[in-house]
Image (cartoon, rainbow, N blue to C red):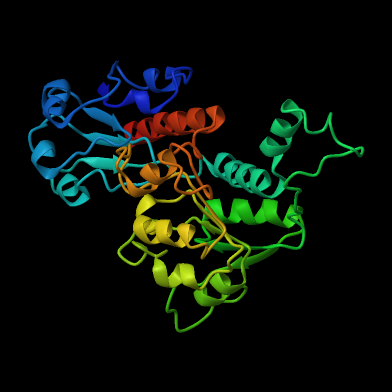
Amino acid sequence: MQTVFLDQQTFSASISLTRIKSEVSTLSCYATTTDSQIIERCKTAEIIITNKVLLSKNILEQLPQLKLVCIAATGMNNVDLVAAKALNIAVKNVSGYSQASVSQYVFAQMLEYFSNTAHHNINTQQGHWQNSATFCFHGKGSQELAGKTIGIIGFGNLGKAVAKIAQAFDMHVMIAERPNAIKIRENRHSFTEVLNKADVISLHCPQTEETINLINSETLALMKPSALLINTARGVLVNSTDLLQALKNKIISHAVLDVLEHEPPTVSHPLISALIKKEIDNLSITAHIAWASIESQQRLIDLVALNIKNYKAV
């Protein structure tokens, strides 16, 4: 089966494609692919592998040989699923590959925030400890995770993985019910209560009409002034303009974002711009890498190969 990988550069160069190659007759890989290049590159392909390249109805209709689209990710919003079904094109995504990577990232950021490890390293490099009048130099100090409350919004595989680690740190875990829910499920708390009580809010919910701008000026105002917000889910869950104002006005203490509305963002993005101009010092942004441990990437690619294998077996 002729196979085309449209955006291999979304993965690290060290990731092996051996298992995919063993399932297909030919594999053509491109670092990136623009909309105008898709048809030419895929006109004889039976399988397309895409991470983020958009496959619209118009494009799918021009690929008569196409039988299977393998999304090298969990989200499926880059493929017109209705058109694919009408054209008898199977679409397979991958899930359950990044729990360890994402949960590790969440706690790496939490530990850095509460332990100030980078700050303490710099203090020694700058000679503060060496010139201290006592045996230690406290600097910004540190806080324990034990006893703090983490609010988890979105309790799928990723939320559960974060909760498991939180319990190992003796944190109190609050699982948020959906906003405006009439009934609160067992072992959950109302969305508002979680925002009110959590020391850390960690977002793990999917992008839906209900979750777009979930974190906005109103919900930010419900959080503790000392709260830490972490978003490893989808950028549109957080209203960037509202968050920037909340950070400037110390409505919450700090935010860690691994995702933004548009990726890659422009330098004019309000949060990116504020960081560059040093208008705020209570924001950390990383380049959508929470999912991307080497192990997680390889697991994902191997699951793509498994999707191809299972498709062939039908």
How many numbered discs? 0
* Residue 236 position within the rendered picture, expressed as x and y whole percent measured from the top left: 35, 55
In the picture, measured across the screen, residue 193 lies left or right of residue 164, that is left
* Residue 120 position within the rendered picture, expressed as x and y whole percent measured from the top left: 73, 37
Q: Residue 207: tell me if it is visible.
A: no
Q: Residue 92: tell me if it is visible.
A: yes
Residue at image point 16% right, 28% down: 38
**Picture quarter containing residue 22?**
top left
**Picture quarter containing residue 166?**
bottom right
Residue at image point 35% right, 63% down: 213
Question: Relative to 7, does residue 97 appear above or below in the rendering?
Answer: below
Q: Nearer the viewer, residue 303 or 116?
A: 116
Question: Relative to 132, does residue 4 appear above or below in the rendering?
Answer: above
* Residue 98 position within the rendered picture, expressed as x and y whole percent measured from the top left: 52, 41
Task: Name the quarter where the N terminus is drawn.
Answer: top left
Q: Nearer the viewer, residue 144 or 303?
A: 144
From this viewpoint, which residue is outermost toward the bottom? 182
Q: Nearer the viewer, residue 278 or 165?
A: 278
**Picture quarter containing residue 25?**
top left
In the picture, measured across the screen, residue 99 lies left or right of residue 313, that is right
Residue at image point 75% right, 53% down: 143
Residue at image point 48% right, 36% down: 289
* Residue 168 position within the rendered picture, expressed as x and y whole percent measured from the top left: 75, 53
Question: Relative to 247, does residue 3 appear above or below in the rendering?
Answer: above
Task: Name the quarter where the C terminus is drawn.
Answer: top left
In the picture, measured across the screen, residue 94 lies left or right of residue 282, that is left
